Amino acid sequence: MTIALLFGTLFVCLLIGVPIAIALGVSALTAIYFGTTMPLSIITQKAFTSLDSFPLLAIPFFMLAGVLMGKGGVSKRLLNLASAMVGWMTGGLSMVTIVACMFFAAISGSGPATVAAIGGFMIPAMVARKYSGGFASAIAASAGSIGVMIPPSIPFVLYGVIGSVSVGSMFLAGILPGLLVGAALMLTAYLISKKRGYKPEPGKESEFHLKDVGKAFWDAKWALLIPVIILGGIYGGVFSPTEAAVVAVVYAIIIGKFVYKELTWTGLYESFRETIVINATTMIIIGLSVSFAYFMTIQQIPGEISDYLTALSTNPFVILLAINVLLLVVGMFIDTISALVVLTPILLPIVTEVGVDPVHFGVVLVANLAIGFVTPPLGVNLFVASSVGGVKFERIAYAVLPFLFTMIVCLLVITFVPQLSLWLPGLYE
């Protein structure tokens, strides 16, 4: 009865368009009121205390660092470097977009932020070169999903906090899967561009010039130092992931204001204001998601789900395949942060019981939810790309299908080749 109330209320709320954070809180409140004798105040208590966490401070600081990078001239220099590296290829502008998104992912830690920062430049540029608007926007939306896989990644921080898994190990584990997805998206974009006759970037000859790459690399050196400082500091034991996020903010201000001199005082103010708004929304989602997850744990719902799945099979590959299907469906309707907070306490005990490494599972979980960024009807990256590119959502949703298929193939590789995720953390240990 309690389970039916909980999930029934959640489904109805989502169906009528209630924001996900409110839907999670209302469903937990309804189930407690009608199905238990627990005090209703437990909802607010858990929501508040869950945010009293030092590691969670990394999230707003990484958000702020990403916004500051975008306004401080970093994204422009990363685009120039990507252009020198791959602009000469067939479909050059699409290749530049993907590579630039991979660079920016190593700074922002956010999928939508990556789409906004890179797509804002590249979608209009591709459309001006006679690329299909849907294709151009789909490229930016798909490549933006890499933002949650290549470190530093906000979902990896959240998963590490909830699952008591090393955030540093999660950052290392995401590097190779992120590069795999980026390479696969480039191959897909190349094949489509070749079929449609999309030319190399304007002004580029159809050959690689190391001199141009060297010049662009030198111009972008201060931007490229950011992930080196963040990851090097974490793995060198200089600072924690949360402290690394603060260092990234200070570095972004210094580079944008005093080196590139493109971060104005107005831009600095707008960066803080934008981060406050985004973070407020994120923290509300996290708080009420934790309340929802706590109530499920008290009612032993994760245990019941675990018993059901393990009754079907104890083969870890079968369990992971079933979980992949579940997560792909969930990603269509629930945002990444809410899904992480709610599902991690349910699924992590199940997979560890059948021998799956928690670090590997974290990558699988985030890779699934990254696909949710480009899967309608929620598809946050699709909406961001539609907004910055001025292209109808329906056109992008259709054009993204080849890239969606590519990402699912990569997901299967990530799922069933654990060493792809575990090799680098293993070297660090």
Image: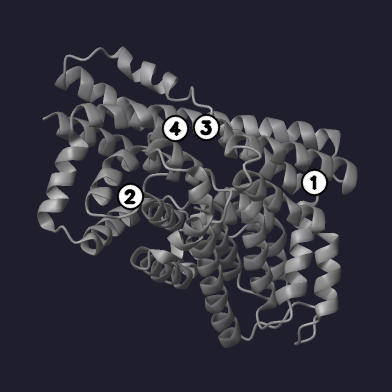
Q: Is residue 418 visible?
A: yes
Give the amino acid type for the residue marked by disc 4 in the picture: Ile
Q: Is residue 203 visible?
A: no
Question: In terms of depth relative to the viewer, which is nearer, 306 or 47?
Answer: 306
Q: First in sequence: mark 1 or mark 3?
A: 3
Q: Which residue is mark 2?
A: 330
Q: First in sequence: mark 1 or mark 2?
A: 1
Q: First in sequence: mark 3 or mark 4?
A: 3
Q: Which residue is mark 1?
A: 72
Q: Report, in whole angstroms, how far the alpha carbon at label 1 lies from the one at label 4.
A: 29 Å
Q: First in sequence: mark 1 or mark 4?
A: 1
Decide: is 101 above or below 337. below
State the image coordinates of residue 81 (x, y, percent, origin top left): 77, 66
Give the amino acid type for the residue marked by disc 2 in the picture: Val
Q: Residues within 10 Å of mark 1 (few under 14, many from 20)?
A: many
Q: Report, in whole angstroms, how far the alpha carbon at label 3 lies from the one at label 2.
A: 24 Å
Question: In terms of depth relative to the viewer, which is nearer, 192 or 143?
Answer: 143
Q: First in sequence: mark 2 or mark 4?
A: 4
Decide: is 192 above or below 240. below
The residue lying at 53 percent from left, 54 percent from top is: 428
Q: Report, in whole angstroms, how far the alpha carbon at label 1 lies from the one at label 2.
A: 36 Å
| Dot in front, 3 or 2 | 3
Q: Residues within 10 Å of mark 3 (few under 14, many from 20)?
A: many
Q: Which residue is mark 4?
A: 285
Q: Which residue is mark 3?
A: 56
State the image coordinates of residue 284 (x, y, percent, origin top left): 47, 28
